[in-house]
Structures are given as C-alpha cells and as structure tokens.
Image: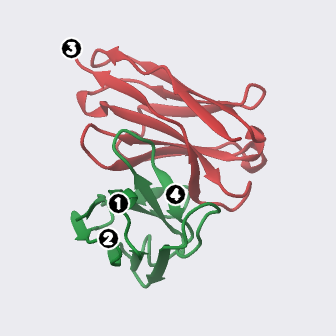
Chain colours: A red, B green
Amino acid sequence: EVQLVESGGRLVQPGRSLRLSCTTSGFTFGDYAMSWVRQAPGKGLEWVGYIRSKAYGGTTEYAASVKGRIAISRDDSKSIAYLQMNSLKTEDTAVYFCTRVGPWAAGSTTFDYWGQGTLVTVSS
Amino acid sequence: QSALTQPASVSGSPGQSITISCTGTSSDVGSYNLVSWYQQHPGKAPKVVIYEGTKRPSGVSDRFSGSQSGNRASLTISGLQAEDEADYYCCSYAGSGTWRFGGGTKLTVL
C-alpha cells in the first residue's frame, strides 16, 4: 500500500525557516517524481514545487509565488522528500500536501497519491 | 500564471448528472491533454478521479468521466449520490515541470 506521511508543520514566526518531511512507503521512491501542493485555510489548492527522480536529474521546479524561498530535495535511501521553506510570510500559512507524481515512474503528470497534509502557521 | 477557471459551485439532485467546466489557456489545458481532476471532502486530502483528460483510476466509480477540447476540460458525474458532495479541482500540466490548479468547485447534492 502506497503511503505518504508529512511532518514538520508548526507555528513559526515570519521571516523564519521550516523544513517539512514526507516519509513514504509502498513503492520504489527513487523511481518517482514528487511534488508539494498547499492549501491556505478555506482556499483552493496551489501547486508549490516538483522534484524529478534521479534518473531525470533530480532537478526541481517551483511556483513563481515561492521561487527563491523554497527548496525541495529528496533522500532516496530513506524514501523521504523534503520541503525547505525560508523567509516565511504570513501568506505561506497553509496545509502542505506531499504528492507522488504518477501513475508511472516516467512521463506522468498526475498527483496520484497524497499525504494527509501538515499545517504550517506563520504568525507573530 | 493565473489559475484555471472553474465555477464556484454547482448542484444537482440524486440521480442527476452534473458537469464542471475548467477553462485554461493555450499554455496549459490547450497545449497538453493532461488535465486531472481531484475530489476533496472536508478535512481530507484530495483524491484523483480523472487523469490525462479522460482516464479513470482503478477504484473510481465509472460515474465519473472527463473530456477535453481546446482550452477547456470538463468533469461529468452521472447518477449523483450523496457521497459525491465535495470540492472538485481541475489541474493542468503547464510544461517544464509546472502545474496550474483551478479555483475549485463546490458540488452540492440537493
């Protein structure tokens, strides 16, 4: 069974940093691209960023709204994806979801599995 | 990078069919047959119900169907059931490892 579990969300002050983790199981993590999607309270879904599998360079892409302030990385040996967020703003307050990009290991563009999300609250 | 356009709300009675539209541009929906649709119940994670425009994942009811033409995609739910009441989001691949979501549509089953 594919599982994704996010952790690391908490209350943080504006301007500070935070790292979220996405621990996965049930599939060969290293074969898949991963992505992060966020949802501000009472709002819609917003794509945040993406990391390719190592077979495709392990490179990253980010939404314009967060570019320069976030970094996605992966540890294939631990089957974990990370979202590093810096210079946090109040508007970054959201539930952050980790997703697998599937359903195939290559050429897929669907967020086929999602974690339960972790809440990040940016407030002084 | 504007969001895709969806109606804020739609409603239907049990047994009826409803369609949710999703309008993008030639940079996203119109360039790729890669629109996916996600169902989200309150307090839950989204779940994919349609991917690549028309494909239905294993385990998703065949009451859900998708279509796509030009810059527009649609999700149709037939034989509405109370459990279908949820928020629905379209999402299009926009090239170079980027995606755009729609603003979401709240489906009410009357």
Is B105 situated left or right of B56 in this image? Answer: left
Q: CA distance from mark 4 to mark 1?
A: 18 Å
Query: How far across and how far down the image is residue B4, in percent?
Result: 33, 65
Q: Label 4 marks which chain's residue?
A: B
The amino acid beneath tag 1 is Ala
The answer to whether residue A83 is seen in the rendering is yes
Q: Give yes or no for contact between labels 3 and 1 (Cβ–Cβ under 8 Å).
A: no
Establish if B50 lies above or below B74.
above
Badge 4 or badge 2: first in the primary sequence: 2
Badge 1 density bin: few <14, some 14–19, many ≥20, Cα 10 Å: few
Q: Residue beneath label 3, please? A: A124
Q: Which mark is residue B14?
A: 2
In percent of width and height, residue B87 lies at 33, 55
Report the amino acid beneath label 3: Ser
Residue identifier under label 1: B82
Residue A47 vertical position relative to residue A19 in the rendered view, above or below:
below
Whether discs 2 and 1 lie on one chain: the answer is: yes
Viewer-proximal residue, B108 or B4? B108
The image quarter containing residue A86 is top left
Q: Which dot, 3 or 2, sits closer to the camera?
A: 2
Q: Label 3, label 1: how many angstroms apart (C-alpha)? A: 41 Å
Amino acid at dot 4: Val
Label 2 CA crowd tier, 10 Å (few <14, some 14–19, many 20+): some
Subunit of label 3: A
Q: Is residue A21 left or right of residue A9?
A: right
Q: Earlier along the polypeptide chain: callout 2 or callout 1?
A: 2
Mark 4 or mark 3, whichever is nearer to me = 4
Along the line of sight, the residue nearer the viewer: A93 or A84: A93
Mark 2 in CB contact with mark 1 (< 8 angstroms): yes
